[in-house]
Image (cartoon, grey):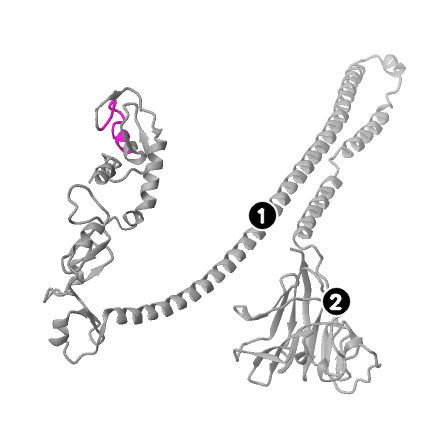
């Protein structure tokens, strides 16, 4: 009884449970930190804070002091009575103070501590279980008897009377036995769910990794574009300043020339006016002697010459037309710089290597078309294929590239990429029979498609209207993709591999021709 009273001293007067992180007020009363914080929060704005027990007042919110000795006592109590902390269920018969329950009696529908358990009935009908508050659902709702069996047909828990009554003839099992079987099923389900969750986590991590890569790529491209346009604006501003400055300089020079000319013309105008007045005076005279004695005025010719010179000066004062031409050239350079920024290499032709073409393939003069033509009698070289194949002179060991192939005049064809170390003789030299080539093949009039690598074939959907094919290579990512350039463009297949050698474009001809159309577009990541 004394221990129960001592135990009661460790209860918080607010939540009525054992202290959790006990703190003390100035008045000496102890509370759970969370409990007293909530009380003080409700007193905000009232102008005064009071202790919930002694009502001691404080104008300012009191500081909470951690009660270390009390914390240690509570900690030791929890260690010695773990069940209380785990279940929170107390003895039904200990009415003076809550004592943790050790067992629950299904028959009595009561929980018992160790002391009351010692004097409890030991008869079979008094079934004991771990402490629980759900005692009512452990009895039959009809007969009020303890549930002892499980009916497998109706999937319900029943008592002994139910098994002899409405469930007579049904297969029944003891609760423990049925529970173990269900646990086994649940373990199997748990195993499957765990496997699915692990697979989901892997997919999630993979997608998150791809998203991070895409975000990093997008951030890199954004940074490049921002820097590019900043540079463009700076170049355009500098160009604008230079052009406007040159226009101002030419305008000022022209204005000075015109001002000098205006001044000269004004002087000439005054001189002409003076001469005109003098001539008018002579014309109005009646004395012949005076008129004849006046010197000749043939200097008007000199005035006309000067006028012609003035016209030439005026004609040469226009703005320099080469200025705008230079401006356009500069703008062209800026635009070319934008192109180079995104396409690190200028578009180039992809050319077929004549020395690799078999004796049944003719290569056009522009080295872009492979024709089926038997018995070409090519000069024998170590590079020449025995099969009806040819590869490009171009090789790719980094970056991203794409080009297009026209196959409209050939019912059966093969296109792809291969290493230069591929065999040139024997069965291993055929593109589909080795691990050094990746190959898209169309054969017969039904337009059936295969992707082949190292004798492994992947059947693609039939009847794809495909007269032009685009091949896209991302060397670092290890991806080789094929696209049918129909309307709309269709993705045929993407091969994933780890490329370890430079790659060449590869063609195989079975009658007709295959033409490389367009140019190689290449860029760096």
Q: Is residue 21 visible?
A: no
Residue that carries the numbered disc 1 in the rendered image: 222
Q: In the rendered structure, which segment of residues is drawn in magenta?
A: 38-52
Q: Nearer the viewer, residue 325 or 111?
A: 111
Residue 77 placement: quadrant? top left
Q: Is residue 20 above or below residue 457?
A: above
- Residue 117 screen position, x and y as percent: 19, 54
Q: Which residue is mark 2?
A: 394
Quadrant of the rendered structure where residue 377 is? bottom right
* The N terminus: image quadrant: top left
- Seen from the viewer's position, the closer of residues 195 and 178 is 178
Mark found first going from the N terminus, 1 or 2: 1
Q: Position of residue 361 (x, y in %)?
A: 75, 81
Magenta region includes residue 309: no
Figure check: 277 above or below 53: above
Q: Residue at the location (34% across, 28% down)?
A: 64
The label shown at residue 237 is none
Residue at x 52%, y 68% (from the top left corner): 488
- Callout 1: SS: helix
């Amino acid at each position: 009884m004394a221990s129960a009273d001592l135990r009661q001293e460790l209860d918080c007067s607010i939540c009525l449970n054992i202290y959790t992180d006990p703190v003390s007020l100035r008045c000496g009363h102890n509370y759970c930190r969370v409990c007293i914080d909530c009380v003080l929060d409700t007193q905000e704005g009232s102008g005064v804070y009071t202790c919930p027990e002694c009502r001691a007042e404080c104008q300012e919110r009191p500081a909470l002091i951690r009660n270390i000795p009390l914390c240690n006592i509570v900690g030791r109590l929890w260690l010695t009575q773990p069940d209380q902390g785990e279940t929170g269920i107390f003895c039904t018969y200990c009415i003076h103070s809550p004592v943790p329950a050790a067992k629950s009696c299904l028959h009595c529908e009561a929980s018992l501590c160790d002391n009351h358990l010692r004097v409890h009935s030991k008869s079979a009908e008094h079934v004991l279980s771990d402490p629980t508050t759900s005692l009512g659902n452990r009895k039959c709702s009809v007969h009020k008897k303890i549930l002892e069996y499980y009916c497998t047909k109706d999937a319900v828990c029943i008592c002994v009377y139910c098994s002899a009554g409405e469930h007579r003839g049904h297969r029944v099992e003891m609760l423990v036995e049925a529970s173990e079987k269900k646990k086994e099923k649940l373990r199997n389900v748990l195993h499957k769910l765990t496997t699915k969750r692990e697979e989901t986590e892997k997919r999630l991590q993979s997608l998150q990794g791809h998203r991070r890569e895409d975000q990093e790529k997008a951030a890199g491209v954004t940074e490049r574009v921002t820097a590019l346009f900043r540079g463009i604006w700076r170049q355009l501003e500098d160009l604008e300043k230079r052009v406007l400055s040159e226009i101002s300089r030419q305008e000022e020079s022209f204005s000075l020339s015109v001002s000098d000319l205006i001044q000269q013309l004004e002087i000439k105008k005054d001189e002409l006016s003076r001469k005109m007045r003098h001539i008018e005076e002579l014309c109005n005279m009646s004395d012949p002697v005076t008129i004849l004695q006046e010197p000749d005025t043939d200097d008007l010719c000199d005035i006309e010459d000067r006028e012609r010179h003035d016209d030439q000066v005026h004609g040469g004062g226009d703005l320099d037309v080469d200025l705008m031409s230079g401006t356009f050239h500069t703008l062209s350079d800026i635009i070319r710089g934008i192109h180079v920024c995104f396409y690190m290499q200028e578009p180039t032709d992809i050319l077929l290597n004549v020395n690799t073409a078999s004796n049944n393939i003719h290569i056009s003069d522009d080295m872009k078309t492979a024709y089926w033509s038997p018995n070409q009698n090519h000069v024998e070289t170590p590079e020449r294929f025995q099969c009806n194949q040819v590869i490009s002179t171009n090789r790719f060991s980094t970056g991203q590239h794409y080009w297009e192939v026209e196959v409209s005049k050939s019912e059966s064809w093969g296109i792809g990429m291969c290493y230069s170390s591929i065999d040139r003789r024997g069965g291993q030299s055929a593109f589909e029979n080795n691990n050094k080539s990746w190959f898209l093949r169309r054969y017969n009039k039904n337009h059936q498609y295969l992707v082949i690598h190292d004798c492994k074939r992947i059947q693609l959907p039939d009847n794809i209207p495909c007269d032009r094919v685009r091949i896209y290579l991302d060397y670092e990512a290890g991806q080789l993709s094929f696209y049918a350039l129909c309307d709309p463009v269709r993705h045929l297949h993407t091969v994933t591999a780890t490329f370890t050698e430079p790659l060449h474009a590869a063609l195989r001809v079975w009658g007709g021709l295959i033409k490389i159309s367009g140019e190689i577009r290449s860029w760096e990541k």
